[in-house]
Image (cartoon, coloured by chain):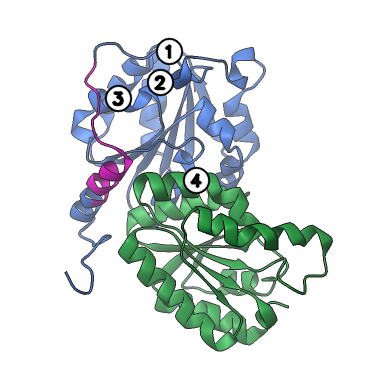
Chain colours: A blue, B green
Amino acid sequence: MKRYDCMLELSRLVSDELVILSLGGSVDEWYNAAPHMRTASLFQQQLGCVTPEAFGLAVGLPHQRVISLDTDGGLLFNLGILATLGNEQPPNLFIVVWDNESYQSIGGPPTHTATGRVDLAAIARGAGVEQSHTVRTLAEFAEHCQAGLAATVPYLVVAKVEGGAQPGIKRKHSDGREDKYIFVRHVEATEGITIMGPSEHN
Amino acid sequence: MQQEAVTAVISGLKRAGVSVVCYLPDSLFKPLYPALDADPELRTIRVTNEGEGASICGGVFLSGQRAVLVMENSGLRAAVEPLARMGLGAGIPVVMLMSYRGELGENNWWAIPHGITMEPVLNALRVPYRIVREQADIEQAIVDSYESSYASYYHSAVVLGGGIVR
């Protein structure tokens, strides 16, 4: 199963949601797979930060569905967030973990999931995120995306995907700072709120 | 920590518009945590480490609500990685309220590193901060911290030390 194909599936299911996603090859892939979600997606180069940030966003916007596109390396960096989610039970947070069993962005050395002993969905269930599932086919992935996007409890899908990034796709040119402004202005417009307003004197 | 200081912290957070509090409890702020939990205007989130707490606060910022990360100053070291990435890499601010462990007069050997490293780490990250030792200054320091962070879109910190916490 290819991550890019999964993203195309997910892309078809989303429109009004907010997305925070992890670093590496998945950034350019999501940028291409879901062009209608570009301003609604925060592209962050932050190992271990993605799901906690998505949770914070979900807390602040309880009426909004928030999607975290995390990775095996990113989740392993901070497994504690699973225990926090298990206790907090955010009803509007859907998490996809792209598990390619490697640190792909630096050339592909294995993560701890590569041995087959470490089961991220089982860890999540043990931490109290009961709706945690591992999928290996596109059909399973699509089915769990539909369930996760409609869930009223935190929902986590570990998507076992092949290594390597989708070739020949357009690169995103913006950096983290520009991405933040784009995302914040999107949230301001859709929510009718001010997050980054004017100074006392301009 | 006296009840009056707890009240001043909560007043400062409310004046600053804070609605979400992430914390990893410590001993110097011991009475503060149940008071935060009990306040109906504040949503408290207990975290497993301060780096996770910083990241959650960053997400809350993106929602338009205001968050604070409450912790012992040792938690600053655990939070350095997400603080550097969010603050220096994206301009996503986190306001921190920390207790001053390891200040002059510290009588626990294990707390000495916290005092030695706190200000150098804050300075390495270029985080503006104020060390408050008088109860009367707590509320305004918290308000000032938010004013700065929402002008710079960068982190800031208030450190409570001296007789406030000892």
Q: Earlier in the sequence, mark 1 or mark 3?
A: 3
Position in image of residue A109 (x %, y %):
55, 15
What separation in Å lies between label 1 and label 3 (alpha carbons)? 22 Å
Disc 2 to disc 3, C-alpha distance: 20 Å
Closer to us: A145 or A183: A183
Residue behind mark 4: B82
Say which residue label 1 marks: A137
Q: Is residue A70 above or below residue B113?
A: above
Q: State the extent of the magenta-drawn residues as a range.
A: A169-184
Tell me the mark number nearer the camera, choosing from 2 and 3: 3
Query: On the image, numbered disc 2 is attached to which residue?
Result: A141
Number of the front mark, 1 or 3? 3
Q: Quadrant of residue B104?
A: bottom right
- In whole angstroms, how far apart are the C-alphas of marks 4 and 2? 30 Å
Q: Residue at x 27, y 33 (%)?
A: A14
Is there a contact, CB below 8 Å, between mark 4 and mark 2?
Answer: no
Tell me the residue that label 3 is attached to: A28
